[in-house]
């Protein structure tokens, strides 16, 4: 359960950015969350409510976009990206070769904030 | 008041990443090879390190270690038996180490980094939470013991993917556990193609010399060229 520490980092980063932009209020925080990030969405939402208490983000909504795993298969017959489902190793669904090029899925990233300004 | 979007595009752990880069620079300036050792609880991190650190000291490769645990300083006491400088980080319930803890402990420690060649960090036993926390290491070493099932890498692909070296531990128990060696290698390689895999027994001492040799060579390549 490291979602609470993730939530605190998230709130800290978002608060700093909001303050720098002169935000009066933050309505929403948009987060991109890859399926390999090791972060459980429900636990993070729960942690977010705790971590925002008493901060400028209190009462704001955390909007999470979950991103599937995308690998690149470099074998001659493929040379393309594939979205893979489940966690069955990072094998190409077409030719079954393991890939070490993960193009998407590791994200744990604040995309944007919806703020109120004067 | 008006509503607008503020684009950010920033990693949530970007602060940890920046601090880790700073620490890595400091450790590398002192000529250290830093290893972040991760595994499930009880896979044999402390047993392996105790053995290795003792042997490394004897062969003229000075080493120090920081060990993280939720509670108790038992593991630090075990590692200290190797004769190397060791400190415990008690995380008090936190399931992973963050780079700030490493930096803080190093700063409060009268340890001359310039006299060392290797620095081990034993992470909290956990295959999920420590994954994306860079501790300023040069190599991440993931352990899989023969008693925990050959499919662990498939269940925790992120951690195995993030590692640079994999070690299959407790090999002395392989036969008793009907451990399928080929399958374990295949599973590790399917989440992390090309990763270097070692097999050790801390109890019997097998595979330890080979592992030390690899670390010594890796360090030599890094600093001697
Ligand atoms: N037979 C055998 N047992 C081992 C070996 N290595 C470790 N063990 C045993 O496995 C248990 C756990 O080993 P530790 O070294 O404490 O494991 P750890 O990964 O440091 O555990 P945590 O720090 O709690 O996550 C202990 O009872 C060890 O004696 C080995 O090579 N062979
Ligand atoms: Mg231990
Ligand atoms: Zn393919």
Image (tube, rainbow, N blue to C red):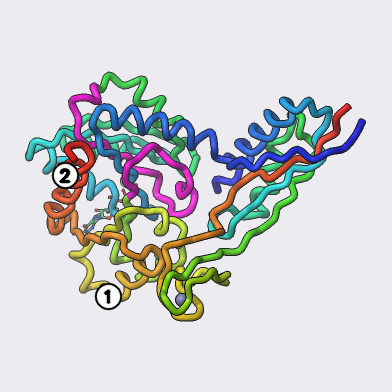
Looking at the picture, does residue B225 appear above or below residue B161? above
Tell me the quadrant of the picture where the C terminus of chain B can be found. Answer: top left
Q: How many marks?
A: 2
Judging depth in this view, the residue of B170 and A13 nearest the camera is: A13
Measured as percent of width and height from the top left, residue A99 is found at: 43, 67
Name the image quarter holding residue B69: top left
Measured as percent of width and height from the top left, residue B1 is found at: 92, 30
Looking at the picture, does residue B207 appear above or below residue B93? below
Q: Return the residue at label 1.
A: B182
**Chain where mark 1 sits:** B
Measured as percent of width and height from the top left, residue A9 is found at: 60, 36
Measured as percent of width and height from the top left, residue B32 is found at: 25, 34
Label 1 neighbour load within 10 Å: few <14, some 14-19, many 20+: few
Q: Is residue B51 visible?
A: no
Residue at 26 percent of width and 59 percent of height: B196
Q: Secondary structure at mark 1?
A: helix
Which disc is residue B216 wearing?
A: 2
Q: Secondary structure at mark 2?
A: helix
The span picked out in magenta is B112-140
Residue at 78 percent of width and 44 percent of height: A61
Looking at the picture, does residue B103 appear above or below residue A93? above
Report if the CB atoms under discs 2 and 1 are less than 8 Å apart. no
Residue A68 relative to residue A92: left or right? right
B139 in the magenta segment: yes
Residue at 46 percent of width and 58 percent of height: B158
């Amino acid at each position: 359960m490291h979602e609470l520490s993730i939530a605190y980092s998230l709130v800290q980063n978002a608060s700093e950015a909001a303050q720098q932009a002169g935000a009066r209020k933050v309505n929403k925080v948009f987060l991109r969350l890859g399926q390999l990030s090791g972060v459980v969405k429900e636990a993070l939402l729960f942690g977010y409510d705790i971590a925002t208490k008493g901060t400028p983000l209190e009462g704001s909504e955390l909007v999470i976009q979950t991103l599937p795993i995308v690998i690149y298969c470099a074998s001659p017959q493929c040379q393309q990206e594939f979205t893979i489902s489940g966690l069955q190793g990072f094998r190409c669904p077409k030719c079954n070769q393991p890939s070490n090029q993960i193009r998407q899925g590791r994200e744990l990233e604040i995309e944007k904030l919806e703020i109120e300004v004067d | 008041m008006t509503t607008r979007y503020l684009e950010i595009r920033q990693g949530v752990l970007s602060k940890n990443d920046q601090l880790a880069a700073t620490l890595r620079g400091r450790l590398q300036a002192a000529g250290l090879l830093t290893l972040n050792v991760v595994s499930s609880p009880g896979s044999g991190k402390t047993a392996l390190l105790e053995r290795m650190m003792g042997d490394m000291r004897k062969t003229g490769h000075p080493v120090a270690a920081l060990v993280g645990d939720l509670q108790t300083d038992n593991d630090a006491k075990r590692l200290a038996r190797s004769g190397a400088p060791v400190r415990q980080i008690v995380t008090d319930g936190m399931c992973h180490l963050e780079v700030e803890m490493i930096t803080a402990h190093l700063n409060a420690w009268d340890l001359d980094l310039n006299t060392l060649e290797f620095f081990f960090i034993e992470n909290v036993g956990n295959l999920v939470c420590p994954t994306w926390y860079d501790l300023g290491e040069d190599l991440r070493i993931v352990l899989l013991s023969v008693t925990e099932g050959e499919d662990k890498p498939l269940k925790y692909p992120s951690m195995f993917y993030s590692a640079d070296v994999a070690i299959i531990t407790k090999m002395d128990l392989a036969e008793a556990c009907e451990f399928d060696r080929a399958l374990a290698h295949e599973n590790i390689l399917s989440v992390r193609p090309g990763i270097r895999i070692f097999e050790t027994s801390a109890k019997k001492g097998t595979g330890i010399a080979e592992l030390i040799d690899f670390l010594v060579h890796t360090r030599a390549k890094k600093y001697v060229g």
